[in-house]
Image (cartoon, rainbow, N blue to C red):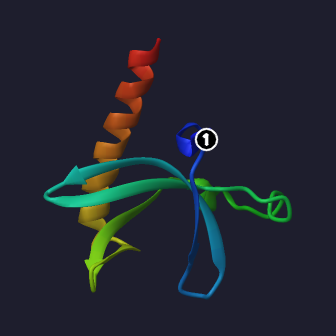
Amino acid sequence: MSEDFGPTFITVTDEDGKEIVLEFVDALEYNGVLYQAFFPAETEDESEEVSEEDTGLVILKVIEENGEELLSTLDSDEELDAVYERFMEALFSEEDGEE
């Protein structure tokens, strides 16, 4: 059976060394750069202590380093705002099309 039908999860480490599990939502290309959107995955031991600010959309860009694809934070608030708007347009247009 193919794994294409279930959610995709990744684990990243933040600047404090804390591991965060993210669920893949969507990907898009903007200005020649590939971006991926994720929602933080709720784990059993964190379910009560997750703050509202930690449950929002996480956007990372795909960069290539030494021939390997890596995920990186965005360089500026302007870049984040522009890409966030595109993800929202894509996500809401998909929802509207499903009705």
Q: Position of residue 27 (x, y in %)?
A: 36, 49
State the residue at coordinates (40%, 35%): 91
Q: Is residue 9 left or right of residue 69?
A: right
User: In the rendered view, would you say 49 is above or below 97?
Assistant: below
Residue under the image location 14 percent in, 57 percent down: 31
Q: Residue at x 27, y 72 (%)?
A: 76
| Left or right position of 82 against 8 | left
Location of residue 26 in the rendering, given as x and y in whole percent from the top left corner: 42, 46
Q: Hey, which quadrant is residue 33 in on the image?
A: bottom left
The crowding category of the residue bearing disc 1, from other C-alpha atoms within 10 Å (few below 14, some 14 to 19, many at least 20), is few
Foreground residue among 34 and 54: 34
* 85 or 10: nearer the viewer: 10
Residue identified by numbered label 1: 6
Going by the image, does 37 lie left or right of 18?
left
Residue 1 drawn at (x, y percent): 62, 38
Q: Quadrant of residue 98?
A: top left
Residue at the far top in the pictured view: 99
